[in-house]
Image (cartoon, rainbow, N blue to C red):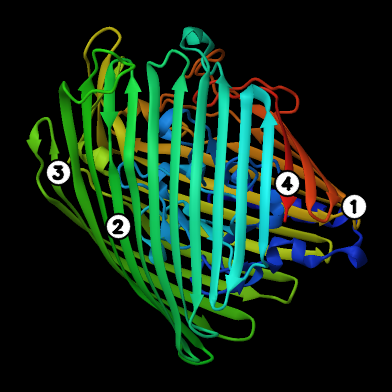
Amino acid sequence: MSKPIRRLTSLALAGLLLLPALPSFAAAADPQTFDLDKVVITATKTEKKVMDVPASVTVITAADLQKQNIRTLDDALQTIPGVYIKGQRGMKATKISIRGLSQNRVLVLSDGMPLNNGYTGGVQWANIPIDNIQRIEVIRGPISALYGSSAMGGVINIITKENAPAETSLSLGAGSQGTRSTTFHHNNVAGKLEYYLDFSRDETDGYIINPAQANQGKFGSDNTQYNLKLVYHFNDTDKIIINKGRADYRYKFETATDRAERLTETTSVQYKARIDPDKELQIRWSELNFSDYWTITGTNFSPNPTKTYEGEINLNWQVNKQHNLTMGFDSKVDSCDGKTYRLSNPAVISYNNLLESSGGKTLTRSVYLQDEMTLSNKTTFVLSGRYDQWKFYNGYNPSGSLPEKNANQFSPKAAFLFKVNEQTSWYLSAGKSFVSPTIFNLARRWDTTNTLLLPNPDLQPETSTSYELGVNHRFNPATAVKVAIFRNNVENIIYQGFNRKLSATKEELQWKNAGQAEITGLEIEVDHRFSPQWSGFVNYTHNNPTITANSDPTLIGKQVPTVPKDAFNIGLTYEKEKWTANLQGRYVSRTYESDKNTEPTSGFGSFQPYFVVDTKFNYRCDKNTTLSLSISNLFDRQYYQESLSPGRTTMLEVRQKF
């Protein structure tokens, strides 16, 4: 056993020994408040309690979202162990990493539908409505054996409401920085049909995000969403589900020379049927369409319409008491047609002066199989594997047509669960995962003031071999703990490698399979109920993300960019009669944006450690009316991620049910 793993194991054991000392009120505790008792589907594509899954899992319920200070969905993920949220402005969207693997290495789903766009692999979190969420399942660790590309760091599945009681609600809010919000939700049942309607509008005048360029003015934005979900029940077991969504997000600086719009349309149709008592069939088709997706920076106007079609057939078959098979076929097409125009007037969109264009398509066809083997009433062995055929075609950029490219990938995974008793379960897993290059990596030439980033149509997929050992334990009905030790060995990292200096202030970079990294880590999390009114949690994550090989030997041994070594979260909730109060604190250690680990120590671009506290108070006036006050960054901590983060902000909301 290596020294890092020995150190992590010692820390984990020390944490376990200290936990029983926490005071508890077991008789008054509700065990359903703990993750260990919540149901999860995403980890194995079959319904199980978290306690019975051989993986690191966190489940966030709709009730959890209401208690916390949540403005956009990524806010709900900030206090999960192993998860790091890096705020980014503009169209780049929030960057999320799980266990040191970020952006397109984390797969995000909505009711099983992929939300990662095929152009950059990113996810637009502001497009996802919160009011219609039933729960969020976060699976940490590789799961390409079931989900293919992008599931290297983990999977986040947002599951929307079904079988919900009829409800109509309207929420109005106002707060700091000229922020206004309106949300409307209505759901009901008409015979065999369930329907859910959602509308939301969020606007903010914004704030100065870069003091060094204060002449740009405030960074303001507005986001409008419409969503419709229909569920038609043919009988008790068979149903068809239709989801249709539209989100229009815009931002601009007061100078209007830096602005953008992203119009996203989502459509999914899913059919679920029980063929016989032992077999359940699911068929899904979906479309993710960034139909109007453009940015204006200075005098450059860049529209990048992007579209993804995806379909899956899944069969779950309980063969006998010992074997449960999950098998499926998946097909996905991504396409992008990007262009850059030079504008004579940045305030007026024009398609007259084309500077360059690039784009292409990727096609992925997949087949997967999983066998959940019950070896005894205490032991389960899960063996799974997925084979993906990937192709890049119809590619082009300023250099002309790009050659077609093919790559095949097999992703196996094995996991063993030993359930000691109803209080304790251990698991051990090992697997391989991969991430395909994006269209941006393969085709897009990106020219900015300081950098010329060139594409590379010869890129190979990234691959990772991962190992994990974990334990879930309930000390008593009031205290639950989860501990996991993991290691990811990543190869063929797709990397912005240095080519040459173009001038004293500008350099040429190119995407390359240039690196290898080793990420070892530890996660410890504790849920505890102090009394019927008071409950809390604490979790700690340690990552040791190290570059172990690179085409530039000076980078070997450096910390992987955009990954903190340490993160610590703590929260406290009070609930009594009409009052609910929630307080959460987040600590993030030093991170680097540069692979050379040479970020400045102060000012814009600094990524120093920070600790931020958020709080929310809810007061239920009566059974239909609720007032809430949210305060983000309670102590007005100044810190940077991509840019200056907001200071203290407040939001007052009223929610009325009808």
Precedes in sequence: disc 4 or disc 1? 1
Precedes in sequence: disc 3 or disc 1? 3
Q: How far is disc 4 from disc 1 in space, using C-alphas?
A: 19 Å
Residue identifier under label 1: 576
Q: How far is disc 3 from disc 2 in space, using C-alphas?
A: 18 Å
Q: Amino acid type of disc 2?
A: Tyr
Q: Secondary structure at mark 1?
A: strand
Residue identifier under label 3: 395
Precedes in sequence: disc 3 or disc 4? 3
Q: Are marks 2 and 1 in contact (CB under 8 Å)?
A: no
Q: How far is disc 3 from disc 1 in space, using C-alphas?
A: 60 Å
Q: Are marks 4 and 1 in contact (CB under 8 Å)?
A: no
Relative to 108, is 163 above or below? Answer: below
Residue shown at the point (59%, 50%) measured from the top left: 130
Camera-near label (2 vs 4) is: 4
Q: Amino acid type of disc 3?
A: Gly
Residue 604, image x and y in percent? Answer: 52, 15
Q: Secondary structure at mark 4?
A: strand
Q: How far is disc 2 from disc 4 in space, using C-alphas?
A: 37 Å
Q: How far is disc 3 from disc 4 in space, using C-alphas?
A: 50 Å
Q: Amino acid type of disc 4?
A: Arg
Camera-near label (3 vs 1) is: 1
Q: Is residue 437 visible?
A: yes
Residue identifier under label 4: 655
